[in-house]
Structures are given as structure tokens and as C-alpha cells.
Image (cartoon, grey):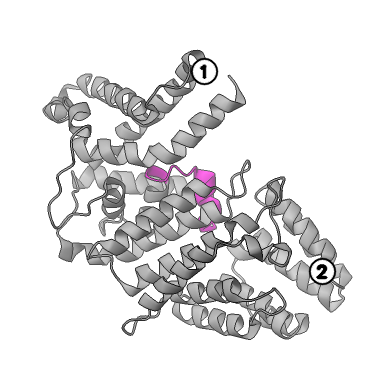
């Protein structure tokens, strides 16, 4: 087994996993989603062995689909109780080669459609997010736990609850248009988390995963073009994604390591992406809606439009974080406001803000909390507190890339 072959399967896993699950679940019903996931995982494992021995097929996506489909049909035939749906899976390959037919009130893309199914109100909210990230985005339980600031055991429990709901509720289908509106918030949240995992991954092997950013952008764009998703919040989310995407090329050095914002070469930032972000931000301003995505897009815009790090309008960013705390209360937003406040006013002002809150355990045990406090204490000259938080931040960092970034940040902060 070569590293190249393993990397090839990893690449196709990220690109094809959700699509395969969505296509097969649409045919056999989402109540059988665990069987579908097993079939897709079997196809990927088979690909690793076969492609190492015989090389990559001409059409890897079609190859994976056929293997997954054949495995699923075989499993279904073993259970007489499932014979009733064999007629649906017999012609899967032929159906896949034909243009898909959708009703006018259905979401047109299979993966986006499945996201709406995963976000059904019958499934508890926390379980919806976990189900979508695991089943459709291919996230590991560890990745989900880190993104949601919870334990892997909790992720597993939430996933099981979601799957039990799907089994008990029968075959959920995409509901009529008027029933989709209540699911939009959950869909937004999944797309937001998907993009964030690409933008700053907790994956040990890759600090930035472009394919996840691209997939989140594609799905968010598709959502914005559908009448149920053409909302100010969707446009604001797209603005945020485009602003962040614009800076991706400048976020890494020649060796692939992460760069601090003040270290980045702004000439590498994609001006066309920034222009698109500004256009979406303008579209998001219609009506009275102001969501967390509006605030975060505004913050990202300030960074993208600033001529330099030192010329950034930190007072505007601090104010936007204050607005973000109002529309989506979270101590994590307070932590980020403290970072902006330190740049605008002083480390002492930032520390006063953080000392006034009682952080929950999920934040106080996070590397983010200790990294910010280490930075602020060093600026304020409290080296004892700096050392304590510095060591904890490095020990809890989720990857070597993040750990290296923290070492450089905390080593270069002026005392």
C-alpha cells in the first residue's frame, strides 16, 4: 500500500462519500441509511485494495458507485424482510446514468436534499447536526466532537438517536416547500461547520482542506438559488465563505504551514472572491434580518478590505463581535471580541473583559481559551500566568499545524 494510493482514496472519500450516501439513500429510503453507509465504506475499502493492485479506473466515481450499489443489493437480498425494496435497487445503475427527475417543490441536488432530510424536526437539533456531518460530510466522531466542543461519546449518542428516529419514522422524503423553511437554520449550521472544518481543520494531516471549503460553497450557492433558501442569512453565509476563501492562498507558507494574519502576503488574496463576497453581503442587507452570519461576514470583510494588519479597523471588528454576542450569545464570541479589543485598546482592557465572564468547561478546557489568555498575559507583562496558559494551549492544540502556529504567535508577541 503506497501513500499515494491511500491519499487517492482519502480524496475520493471526501468528494464522493456524501454523494454516494445521498444517491443510495434516496432510492432505498433513509431508514436504511446505516446499510447505505456500510456499503459506501465497503466500496472505499475495496477501492484501496483494487486500485493499489490494478491502478485507478477510468471513472473512479462510477466505479465506487457500482461497488457500493452491488454490496447494498447483496445485503438486502440476505434479508427476506427487505425484499420489498429490491425492485427499487435493481436498476440503480441505469437510473444513475439518466437525468434525475425532481418535483418543483423538491431540493434539486441530492446532497442538499439529503441535508434537509437530516434536518427534519423529528430529529433532536443536536442530533441533526451530528447526523449530517457524519453521514453526508464524512466527518469522524473526533472531528465532530472538536467542532461542537463535546465528547466523542456524546457524538456517538446523538448519532444513534438520529438514526433511531429515521428507522422509527419510516422513509422520510423531501417535504413540500412550505415545510422546508423550518429546517433552513440547521442546514445553514451544517454548511457553516463544513466550511470551517475546511478553513481550519482539526485533521492531523492537513490544516486546510480545500475540498471541504469548495463543497460548502457549492451547496450554499445551490441553496441560495433555490426559492426556499434565497434568504438574507444564506447570502450572508455565502459572503462569509467567499471572504474566507479569498484569503486561503495567503494562509500557508511554502511548506504548507499556517501563517498568522499579520504574516500573510495580501497580494495573494483573491480580489475576485472578495468582490463576490461584497456583492453577497450587499444582497444580505435586504429586510430586517440580522443574523450571526451577517456579523461574521462583516468581520471577515473588515479583514479583507484592510490595507494592512495595522490599518485594520479593530474598533469596527470589536463592535461587530459585540453585535454577534447579542444575536448568537456565546462566550467564544466574547473571547474573539477580547482579541480585537487588545489590538484596538490594550491587553489590560481585553483581560478585564474576559475576567468578567465565567467560561463554561468546554471553552476553558479548549486550546483557544488558553492561547488567547497566554497572548494577553504576555502583553500585559504577567509572565507567570503567560507560562501557565502557554503550556496548556500547546498541550491541547488539535494538530501539529495549529501547535506550530501557536508557538510562533506566542513567541513573537511583544512583552
Judging by the rendered image, the residue that carries numbered circle 1 is 52
- Return the x and y of residue 359 as percentages of the image width and height: 62, 71
Was residue 136 drawn as part of the magenta stretch in this picture? Answer: yes
Task: State the CA–CA distance, disc 1 to disc 2.
Answer: 48 Å
Seen from the viewer's position, the closer of residues 302 and 203 is: 302
For the residue labelled by badge 2, is the local secondary structure a helix, a strand or a loop? loop
Which quadrant does the N terminus fall into?
top right
For the point 34% across and 74% down, which residue is it?
A: 232
- Return the x and y of residue 272 as percentages of the image width and height: 49, 64
The answer to whether 111 appears left or right of 6 in the picture is left
Was residue 317 drawn as part of the magenta stretch in this picture? Answer: no
For the point 61% across and 26% down, which residue is it?
A: 3
| Vertical relation: 252 (above or below) 206 | below
- Return the x and y of residue 388 as percentages of the image width and height: 81, 63
- Return the x and y of residue 284 as percentages of the image width and height: 37, 76
Judging by the rendered image, the residue that carries numbered circle 2 is 413
- Residue stretch in magenta: 134-151
**Number of dots carrying numbers:** 2
Seen from the viewer's position, the closer of residues 413 and 150 is: 413
Q: Hey, which quadrant is residue 281 in on the image?
A: bottom left
For the point 18% across and 44% down, which residue is it?
A: 170
Amino acid at each position: 500500500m503506497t501513500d499515494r494510493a491511500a491519499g487517492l482514496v482519502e480524496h475520493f472519500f471526501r468528494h464522493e462519500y456524501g454523494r454516494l450516501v445521498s444517491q443510495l439513500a434516496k432510492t432505498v429510503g433513509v431508514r436504511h441509511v446505516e446499510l447505505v453507509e456500510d456499503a459506501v465504506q465497503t466500496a472505499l475499502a475495496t477501492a484501496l485494495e483494487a486500485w493499489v493492485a490494478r491502478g485507478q479506473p477510468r471513472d473512479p466515481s462510477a466505479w465506487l458507485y457500482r461497488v457500493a450499489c452491488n454490496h447494498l443489493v447483496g445485503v438486502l437480498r440476505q434479508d427476506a424482510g427487505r425484499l420489498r425494496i429490491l425492485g427499487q435497487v435493481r436498476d440503480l445503475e441505469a437510473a444513475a446514468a439518466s437525468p434525475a427527475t425532481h418535483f418543483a417543490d423538491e431540493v434539486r441536488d441530492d446532497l442538499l436534499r439529503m441535508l434537509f432530510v437530516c434536518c427534519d424536526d423529528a430529529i433532536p437539533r443536536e442530533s441533526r447536526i451530528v447526523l449530517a456531518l457524519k453521514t453526508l460530510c464524512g466527518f469522524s466522531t473526533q472531528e465532530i466532537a472538536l467542532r461542537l466542543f463535546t465528547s466523542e461519546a456524546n457524538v456517538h449518542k446523538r448519532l444513534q438517536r438520529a438514526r433511531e428516529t429515521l428507522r422509527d419514522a419510516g422513509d422520510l422524503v423531501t417535504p413540500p416547500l412550505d415545510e422546508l423553511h423550518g429546517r433552513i437554520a440547521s442546514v445553514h449550521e451544517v454548511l457553516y461547520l463544513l466550511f470551517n472544518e475546511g478553513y481550519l481543520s482539526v485533521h492531523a494531516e492537513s490544516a486546510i482542506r480545500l475540498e471541504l471549503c469548495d463543497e460548502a460553497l457549492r451547496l450554499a450557492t445551490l441553496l441560495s438559488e433555490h426559492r426556499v433558501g434565497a434568504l438574507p442569512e444564506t447570502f450572508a453565509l455565502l459572503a462569509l465563505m467567499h471572504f474566507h476563501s479569498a484569503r486561503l492562498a495567503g494562509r500557508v507558507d511554502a511548506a504548507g504551514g499556517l501563517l498568522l494574519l499579520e504574516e500573510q502576503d495580501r497580494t495573494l488574496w483573491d480580489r475576485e472572491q472578495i468582490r463576490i463576497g461584497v456583492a453577497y453581503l450587499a444582497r444580505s442587507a435586504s429586510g430586517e434580518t440580522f443574523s450571526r452570519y451577517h456579523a461574521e461576514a462583516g468581520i471577515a470583510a473588515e479583514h479583507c478590505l484592510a490595507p494592512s494588519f495595522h490599518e485594520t479597523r479593530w474598533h469596527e471588528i470589536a463592535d461587530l463581535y459585540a453585535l454577534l454576542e447579542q444575536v448568537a450569545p456565546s462566550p467564544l464570541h466574547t473571547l474573539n471580541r477580547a482579541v480585537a479589543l487588545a489590538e484596538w485598546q490594550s491587553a489590560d482592557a481585553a483581560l478585564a473583559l474576559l475576567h468578567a465572564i465565567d467560561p463554561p468547561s468546554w471553552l476553558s478546557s479548549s486550546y483557544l481559551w488558553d492561547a488567547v489568555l497566554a497572548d494577553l498575559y504576555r502583553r500585559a507583562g504577567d509572565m507567570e500566568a503567560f507560562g501557565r496558559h502557554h503550556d496548556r494551549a500547546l498541550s491541547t492544540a488539535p494538530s501539529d499545524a495549529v501547535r506550530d502556529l501557536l508557538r510562533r504567535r506566542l513567541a513573537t508577541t511583544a512583552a
